[in-house]
Amino acid sequence: MTNITGSILSQEKLSDSDILVLLSSGMEDRNKMYIKSAAIRDTYVGNKVFLRGLIEFSNICSKNCLYCGIRAGNTNVHRYNLEDEEVLEAAMYAFENHFGSIVLQSGERDDRIFTDRVDSLVKRIKNLSGGKLGITLSMGEQTEETYRRWFESGAHRYLLRIETSNPDLYRRIHPDNAKHNYKERLDSLINIKKIGYQVGTGVMIGLPFQTMEDLVSDLRFMQNFDIDMVGMGPYIEHVDTPLYQYRDTLLPLDERFNLTMKMIALIRILMKDVNIAATTALQAIDPMGREKAIKIGANIMMPNITPAKYRSDYKLYDNKPCIAEGADDCAGCMEARVKLAGAEIGYDAWGDSKHFENRKEI
Ligand code: SAH
Ligand code: SF4
């Protein structure tokens, strides 16, 4: 087994069956893979980790994804919507702490009040920071016109996970209606790319009914779509969701964690110069989860800068960390932890995806 992994890792190109072997590898073999993925990160994107202050600005959502704690159908959620001033203050906090960028994330809404408001917030944040703060949006599926409008107002990166690249699995983890449609999600990603955003996507790992072959297809999906940014995390069950009934069929949490780490290493090996986030869901399983992901090839961290009083209401899954005051994400703590992971923080920089720059040049 060990020799097989060694020879697979020395190949220039990986076949689907090579990827399956690597996804199934035990500790010794996966450590070899991690040495390779970390070296590729250092060569192609450097060892700087860029920060995006995450503002979870509303948990009001019009959708009903079967895995998500803030789905519209969950009546046990206290719904909130940050005041404009609170969003601007959080953005200024990021700016003054030299984070370089923010991510505005929320439940999905497509009404005019919402789309107008996001547009105005993007413009105001740009103005407040003299154009210096980079803005990533993550607000689900929108019309091409809305995506364009937000782009023209100053957002330049968009995160929309495909969640799974298997349309059948997609159907099983979403309600069966037009609002939750694989093809629509894909079309949204196509629009985001066409408009000129840096495109981020990703999947959940360890979903009920998901197979190893699905994960191989997920990696191929990201490669074929030629995405710029990746955000992948373990699926974590939430008690108030329909998928909770399948909790006994899931992989143990530590295995979901390890599988996510392998997926991160593999996408780094396959795509080389993309930005890869060390996601919060990793931290929900292991307090040092994000740092472990950085050690093996991730290069983006998203410290939560949502005002503390709202955090416990943005619970996509159980055990979501940072619900108390974000002491873990204080500037000095992050710096020390990133250093322990063998990298350093790139302050006051957008840290755009090198892959985006490279694909624009072609
Ligand atoms: N509403 C937007 C953005 C907020 S949700 C959207 O859906 O795109 C952001 C991400 O949280 C989703 O893409 C999904 O991958 C993740 N998520 C939701 N529920 C989760 C769960 N139970 N476990 C892990 N990740 C989850
Ligand atoms: Fe809403 Fe996003 Fe959760 Fe789906 S994953 S229910 S769109 S917040």
Image (tube, grey):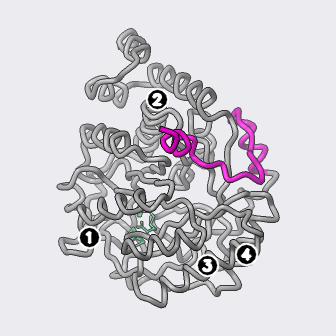
Residue type at numbered disc 3: Tyr
Indicate yes or no whether the magenta region holds residue 361: yes
- Relative to residue 228, is residue 309 drawn left or right? right
Residue found 27% across the figure and 53% down from its top: 208
Say which residue label 4 marks. 127
Residue type at numbered disc 1: His
Q: Measure the C-alpha gap from mark 2 to mark 4.
A: 38 Å
x and y percent of residue 40 in the render? 56, 27
Residue found 46% across the figure and 54% down from its top: 199
Camera-nearest label, 4 or 3: 4
Q: Measure the C-alpha gap from mark 3 to mark 2.
A: 38 Å
x and y percent of residue 221 in the render? 32, 44
- Start and end of the magenta stretch? 333-362
x and y percent of residue 117 in the render? 55, 85
Name which of mark 3 and mark 2 comes first in the sequence: 2
Residue found 61% across the figure and 42% down from its top: 299
Residue found 74% across the figure and 61% down from its top: 327
Say which residue label 1 marks. 180
- Label 2's element? helix
Q: From the image, which quarter does the N terminus lie in?
A: top left
- Label 3's element? helix
Residue 74 lies, with reference to residue 331, above or below; the image says below
Camera-nearest label, 3 or 1: 1
Q: Measure the C-alpha gap from mark 3 to mark 1.
A: 27 Å
Residue type at numbered disc 2: Ile
Q: Measure the C-alpha gap from mark 4 to mark 3.
A: 25 Å
Name which of mark 4 and mark 1 comes first in the sequence: 4
Checking the image for residue 310, the label placed there is: 3
